[in-house]
Amino acid sequence: QVQLVESGGGLVQPGGSLTLSCVASGTQFNFLIVGWYRQAPGKERDLVATISTGGTTNYADSVKGRFTISRDNAKNTVSLQLNILRPDDAAVYYCNARKYYESLEYWGQGTQVTVSS
């Protein structure tokens, strides 16, 4: 069973930055394809960014050039650096992972990001 624990959310002013972290346990970390999703009130959960086992990244158009996803296999951690935050980035951010050879997905509990002056 894969467990995912997110941290790093909080309140930030427009234009500010945050770093979210997702720590995984319960499996060999370098087997995991990891993604960040977000869900604002009344909206669907949308993909923000993904990182493959080999480090290939993919971003939603709305965050390209502002957000950076990275992984540290030694620390079992995937990070999401959020820069130039806008009010419409406010949401609960969820970490998602699956083993590269399976379709079963795992989710973290989410971390709240609030962007407001």
Image (cartoon, helix red, strand yellow):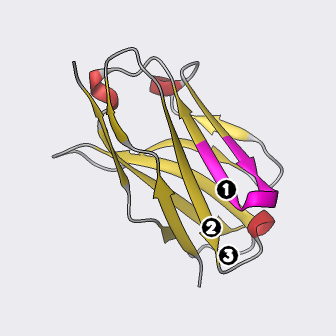
> Which amino acid type is shown beneath numbered disc 3?
Glu
In the rendered image, the quadrant that contains the N terminus is bottom right
Label 3 crowding class (10 Å Cα cut-off): few <14, some 14-19, many 20+? few
| Residue type at numbered disc 1 | Thr
Q: Quadrant location of residue 68?
A: top right
Q: Nearer the viewer, residue 42 or 68?
A: 68
- Distance between the alpha carbons at the discs numbered 2 and 3: 16 Å
- Going by the image, does 34 lie left or right of 115? right
Q: CA distance from mark 3 to mark 1?
A: 20 Å
Percent coordinates x, y for residue 60 in the rendering = 51, 33
Query: Which residue is label 3 attached to?
Result: 102
The percent position of residue 79, horizontal first and vertical second, equals 61, 45
Q: Which residue is mark 1?
A: 77
Q: Please indicate whether residue 91 sits to the left or right of residue 26 in the image.
A: left
Q: Earlier in the sequence, mark 2 or mark 1?
A: 2
Query: Would residue 71 be counted in the magenta stretch?
Result: yes
Residue underneath mark 2:
24
Indicate yes or no whether the magenta region holds residue 18.
Answer: no
Q: Residue furthest left?
A: 42
Residue 76 screen position, x and y as percent: 71, 62
Instruction: Please state which amino acid type lies under the numbered disc 2.
Output: Ala
What SS does tag 1 mark?
strand
| Measured Cα–Cα span from mark 2 to mark 1 | 6 Å
Q: Which contiguous range is marked in magenta?
A: 70-79
